[in-house]
Image (tube, rainbow, N blue to C red):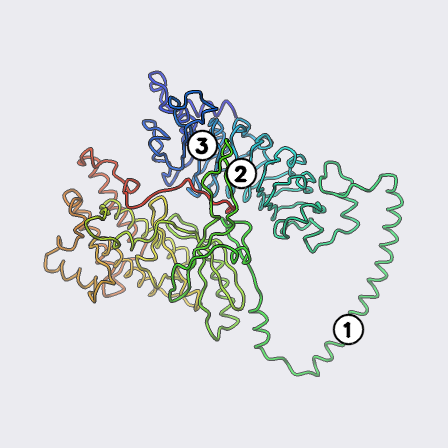
Amino acid sequence: MALRVLFLMLSAFPASCLAVAAPISPDAVPLLAFKSACADPAAALVSWTEASDPCSDRWRGITCRKPSPPTSPSPSSSPPRVRRVVLEGLRLGGDAGAVAALAGLPMLSFLSLKNNSFTGSLGDVDFSTLAPHLKLLYLSGNGFSGRFPESVLRLRHLRRLDLSGNRLTGTIPPEIGHRLPSLLTLHLARNSLVGPLPASLGAMSRLAKLNVSGNHLQGRIPKRLAAVFPASSFAGNPELCGAPLRRRCNGQHHMVYGGGGGGGGADTSHEPKRGRTRSNDRWMVAMIMAAVGAAVASLVAAALCGVLWLKDKKPERPRASSRTSSMAREETVRFDGCCVEFDVCTLMRGAAEMLGKGATATTYRVAMGGDDVIVDDAGVVEEGKAGEVVVVKRMRRREGATREDERRKRELAREMGTWRHANVVSLRAFYASADELLLVFDYVPNGSLHSLLHENRGPARVPLEWQTRLKLAQDAAQGLAYLHGVSGGKLAHRHLTSSNILVDAGGNTRVSDFALLQLLVPAPAADEAAQKQDVNAFGVVLLEILTGRSPEDGNVDLALWARTVVREEWTSEVFDVELLPSRGGAEDEMVALLHVALLCVADDPGERPRMAVVAKMIEDIRDRGSKRSRYSASPSQVGHSYESSPSISEDTTRSTNASSS
């Protein structure tokens, strides 16, 4: 593995470059080695180039800082060093060798690669080179396999460790509590770990959060852990027993796990010399239990006969009570990427801010948790985090809902939780009861397409240039096309506007609120006409992008106005005045997108194209524009992208403190 990482680091630069000059930054080599070992289908690391510097040129996800005076006698002459690498949910892939490349960053204090697609054995990665500074390590939501990485136990300053949502096997190291005494949070949920919970975990006096749910752990929960952590920390392990779980430890659990070597957390009070006596006791207990069981079975059979006889004599209960009983059942469902601690109590304790009320739901911004504190090497508290931020939609209640409505609603919510696309706002969890339906979505920080296009118009506004608008249109089209396809043609948005097309930190648009109206009133039948209505609504969004006009301004029908202007050959009057600087080289693209918009808003729904076709047409327009700009753009225009637009700020270095794997 070490030779492979060295090869990756050397291959990150051409041989001629290595011979002529050293890298701009000492940390550029391992970062470029990581990039070369990664699969990056979304081009998330496009800003990482050999000709730039990771610190001064703001590589995505990289945060740097100059060494503190104790580390360097002359800090003014020392270049900044990479302190944080935060690349979350960017669809990056590759094996563990890519992660091993990042071990060449000696000053790294925060590493997060959660919610990507990395695979391979973490046991092959030597994290020990990061021991002097690494405090936060988040690798959740990937496909890492193998045993618990031994080298992690050498990270003596580690405060937070999240390996949940992977494929780790084997046991939790018995000495983990003694080797990582500074640990504040430990998340190992949703793996395939086996064996007992180490007793050394109980010695970690600073441990504030623990989650080992969804594994195959066995034996009694150590008393200290049982006294501190809730049942949700241990749920989903059928062979775990004892408080705070309701599963009692019987004699067999004591025998199997109490005397096993290395079984931290088990009861070791049994002595081998008493084995034969306990064996005889077990036979006696078994005989007594068999006799009692036979007697109980007879009583149950008699009682059942009596109940059946009485049932024939009593009138049948009305169906309404059965429906009420079914609808009263509460459930919390978490999907891939949700924080493992999520439950309705955690949600209700979070700091909430109401964002608005709509026809289907009231929307809140909720910060859950919020107890993370990051301390640097000098003991100074850095910028804190308010906890994992999510958006919660509290759905409107529908009077007279039937049992079948409730079943369809929950089925649809489960289906929505499986939808994953870079241009769709993901549903991470939901809570359902007879009175409530709470949907937990990703929080998208940079507002909506509507606010980008229409807010703060005037002399002080920074215009949204053409290439940015075209990219936003393509993203939204791809997201809506995916939703139409993944739902099998039976679902639609039904209320698509530029206000529910959101913009994330990477400058990508993401469609939100898809199918919420159908969630409110579940409909069993497919409705192709509703998807055609979505196409019409998307055409209006394209007209907003092109004209800068809002459908909410005055009583003007935007589609009718655009058709009239084009019919009277005033096409140039359609486009937003903010696009004047772009018209010289891009007017052909604007006209092409205008024709796509007019196709979408055709009066006859049968003439409107499917969203998959619309997305392809916009992709072709953008591809033609890229080829044109490659040959004709001036040096000042080349490379001007969304990320360079001051209308949106990108902050990918902030990470949620709770596990969201």
On the question of residue 524 being in view, the answer is no
Coordinates of residue 256 in the picture (x, y in percent)? 77, 44
Q: Quadrant of residue 247?
A: bottom right
**Residue at 53% in and 28% down:** 132
Q: Quadrant of residue 365?
A: bottom left
Q: Quadrant of residue 486?
A: bottom left
Q: Is residue 30 above or below residue 632?
A: above
Pointer 1 local density, CA inside 10 Å: few below 14, some 14–19, many at least 20: few
Q: Could you tell whether 18 is left or right of 655 in the image?
A: left
Task: Kindly state the secondary structure of the residue where label 2 is placed.
Answer: strand
**Residue at 61% in and 34% down:** 180
Cα distance, mark 3 to mark 2? Answer: 24 Å
Task: Kindly state the secondary structure of the residue where label 3 is placed.
Answer: strand
Coordinates of residue 621 in the picture (x, y in percent)? 23, 46
**Residue at 14% in and 58% down:** 566
**Earlier along the polypeptide chain: callout 3 or callout 1?**
3
Task: Kindly state the secondary structure of the residue where label 1 is placed.
Answer: helix
The residue singled out by tag 3 in the image is 83
On the question of residue 395 being in view, the answer is yes
Work out whether residue 95 or residue 584 is closer to the camera in this orientation and state it.
Answer: 584
Cα distance, mark 3 to mark 1? Answer: 70 Å
The residue singled out by tag 1 in the image is 303
The residue singled out by tag 2 in the image is 144
